[in-house]
Amino acid sequence: MNDPFANDTSYVTVPLDHRRLAPGESLAQAHAFLDTMRHRRSVRAFSPEPVPFALIEAAVAAAGTAPSGANQQPWTFVAVGDPEFKARIRAAAEEEEREFYTSHITPAWRAALAPLGTDPIKTHLTDAPWVVVVFAQAFGLERQDDGGEHQFKHYYVAESVGIAVGLFLASLTHAGLVALTHTPNPMGFLGTLLERPRNERVYVAIPVGYPAPDATVPAHALAKKPLDTILVRVSPDNRAGADDLTGGAAS
Ligand code: IYR
């Protein structure tokens, strides 16, 4: 009667639409995706070549499938293709960055960035055909019919937006595009420039496009941690020879 877990009529279910792959196909797809992602690089030298908006749309739609706290989807992707806006973003970002690199950067931070060769010059913000600025919705804000606003809490915002950005980058990579996760420091100016509502906080700016023909990347960026340093297996079924795909299926 007073069961706090009693079924609520607002909790409706539908059958899961899951496409089960054959084990062999599963591993082949996992490896094909890994190969694609191993070629992902953060690119700072872009070609001005245009990128169809349909590719941005598809990548944002992929990002929009991300899991999020209470399925609140607390993200907004603003795709800036207008050269005038990109120029304004670059000018403001470079101003902030000059300040960062001359005054705010700590010696440890400078040392950590040294192998990447970053500096305050942000040509990618004007060269890339698109700069996608991702905003996190710190809280929900809905316009009411009576003109008022309904404000409500959002949960796990940073985690949710991080996952969505990961899917966005994976989708771009899968489509043969390159990007840079750029975090102007500080970057509040982007909310003002793009006239975002008061519940949105800029999360990252992502130039998207094709690499310049002579693009290089820092060698340091190619060094990814080996699998055995990032994966810890806790499993009763890790005997030598156990099949990783079918063994322990009931765990
Ligand atoms: N926001 C600066 C500095 C910077 C910080 C980190 I952590 C990086 O991985 C790269 C750059 C800039 O954009 O140059």
Image (spheres, rainbow, N blue to C red):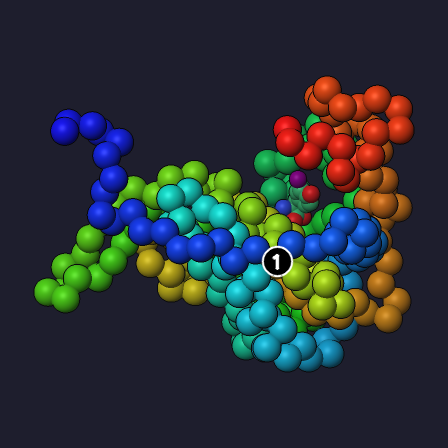
Instruction: Identify whether 46 is placed above or below 31.
Output: below
Q: Answer with the quarter of the image where residue 138 lies.
A: top left
Q: Amino acid at mark 1?
A: Arg
Q: Does 66 sit left or right of 127 as displayed?
A: left
Residue at position x 44%, y 59% from top? 76
Q: Does 176 sit left or right of 161 as displayed?
A: right
Q: Quadrant of the C terminus?
A: top right
Q: Kindly tell me whether residue 36 is visible in this rendering.
A: yes
Q: Closer to the camera, 39 or 96?
A: 39
Q: Does 55 sit left or right of 239 as displayed?
A: left
Q: Position of residue 146 (x, y in %)?
A: 10, 65
Q: Closer to the camera, 207 or 18?
A: 18
Q: Closer to the camera, 208 or 153?
A: 153
Q: Position of residue 1 (x, y in %)?
A: 14, 29
Q: Kindly tell me whether residue 93 is visible in this rendering.
A: no
Indicate the quadrant of ligand 1 in the picture.
Answer: top right
Residue at position x 61%, y 42% from top? 100
Instruction: Identify whether 1 is placed above or below 200.
Output: above
Element type where label 1 sits in the image: loop
Q: Position of residue 148 (x, y in %)?
A: 14, 59
Mark 1 burial class by Cα count in 10 Å: few <14, some 14-19, many 20+: few
Instruction: Identify whether 158 is placed above or below 66.
Output: above
Q: Position of residue 42 (x, y in %)?
A: 74, 53
Q: Closer to the camera, 68 or 224?
A: 68
Instruction: Identify whether 21 is placed above or below 244.
Output: below
The residue at label 1 has a CB less than 8 Å from ligand 1: no
Residue at position x 42%, y 52% from top? 73
Residue underneath mark 1: 19
Residue at position x 38%, y 64% from top? 195
